[in-house]
Amino acid sequence: MEEGDCVFCKIVNGEIPAEKVYEGDNFVAFPDANPKVEGHCLIVSKKHFANVMDMPASLGGELIDAIKSVAEIKLKEGAEGFNLVMNNSPSAGQIVMHAHVHLLPRKKGDGFSIIR
Ligand code: AMP
Ligand code: ZN
């Protein structure tokens, strides 16, 4: 499943280049083009789902594996922790309508804040 004008579908199929930091059967991860913190990455489903409500629960385990793989890389690179954010629908801030999870590496005192 692919949507003609979807930027993340184009990254998944190689039409738009991206520096992939992780690739599995159903998910890929690459740096966010406008990082909110150093190392900010997006974990993106290879199939086009609009958001988490479209995704089959059977992909949940692979999504966790993808998150942990990217997090391990970021922790090795010096992050001390990380936030996961998923915007679902424009009213929640979703701009790219292709399901993705933001992984935001964190360090104590970095000044960034999501909830606290
Ligand atoms: P959102 O839909 O609000 O969860 O965020 C979409 C994210 O995708 C934003 O943080 C953008 O900076 C990022 N983004 C948009 N286009 C690209 C691209 N071609 N490569 C990497 N990141 C992108
Ligand atoms: Zn797409």
Image (spheres, grey):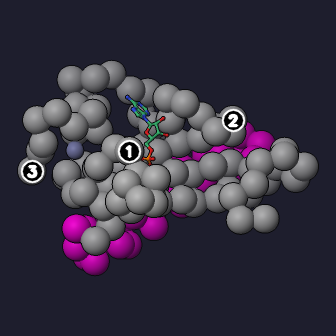
Residue for badge 1: 95
Q: CA distance from mark 1 to mark 3?
A: 20 Å
Magenta-colored span: 54-79
* Contact (Cβ within 8 Å) of mark 3 with mark 2: no
Mark carried by residue 38: 2
Which amino acid, by three-letter code, is at mark 3?
A: Met
Whether disc 1's CB lies below 8 Å from ligand 1 is answered yes
Residue for badge 3: 1
Q: Residue at x 75, y 54 (%)?
A: 113
Can see residue 27? no
Q: Residue at x 22, y 73 (%)?
A: 56
SS at badge 2: loop
| Label 1, residues with CA under 10 Å away: few <14, some 14-19, many ≥20 | few
Q: Position of residue 69 (x, y in %)?
A: 52, 54
* Residue that lies at the very extreme toward the front in this rendered image: 91
Give the camera-side residue of 77 and 114: 114
